[in-house]
Image (cartoon, helix red, strand yellow):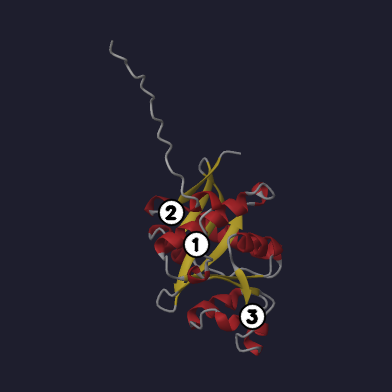
Amino acid sequence: MNVKIHIANNNYVGYAQEICDLIYESAQARGTGIAKRSSEYVANKLRDGRAVIALDGDKLVGFAYIETFSHKRFVANSGLIVHPDYRNQGLAKRIKRKIFELSRTLFPEAKIFSITTGLAVMKMNTELGFKPVTFSELTDDEEFWKGCQGCRNYDILQRNNARMCLCTGLLYDPKAEPVKEASSFAKKLVKPVVKTRKTQKIHKR
């Protein structure tokens, strides 16, 4: 496997429809659904550099994109997919880390969140510092919740007024990052050792 993960740009727009097809196939296989997106929507994400795309040569094998909500105070890492032939090889984790790092670079002050039913995604998010939260701690932007309309569980979300569903909410808050203490080694003041050279006394006769 010689897969490379690229930060998207205009050169990858031609993959938009293929990405949509892979998203649909993944949704069918998962049985719970992934928010549907049009090829035009995906093309814009690729064009704007708010996505990462995994390629094996020229073959599409994975994808994820960034969405912003509530005046860019919240960021969602969405649409994580891996081609069936490339699963169980650690590729999803690589894509997840890449889209997370891109989110932190583009929106360093934003809270990053995710909703998922997948245990593997929960584990990946936890490793990156995400914490499980109630939906009330996520964005209240209606545009985000509209994106759930393509999910088969959308009626459950509606019945609960977007307060709960089968998904688990996960949140990364950059302001909640623990301040790393200096190591005990760094705390010690190491004084330089200055060696003095002993000079012999010369006795004059």
Q: Report the Cα–Cα distance between label 3 and label 1.
A: 21 Å
Quarter of the image with the C terminus is top left
Q: Report the Cα–Cα distance between label 3 and label 2.
A: 30 Å
Quarter of the image with the N terminus is top right
Locate residue 185 relative to residue 158 in the image: left or right.
Answer: left
Callout 2–callout 1 Cβ contact below 8 Å: yes
Give the camera-side residue of 36 and 180.
Answer: 180
Label 1 element class? strand
Q: Mark 1 points at which residue?
A: 65
Is label 3 or label 1 in front?
1
Residue at image coords 65%, 47%: 86
Residue 20 sits in quarter: bottom right
Whole-percent x and y of residue 37? 52, 68
Type of residue at label 1?
Answer: Tyr
Q: Name the residue under label 3.
A: 154
In the image, residue 200 above or below residue 87: above
The mark nearer the N terminus, 3 or 1, is 1
Callout 3–callout 2 Cβ contact below 8 Å: no
Q: Name the residue under label 2.
A: 8
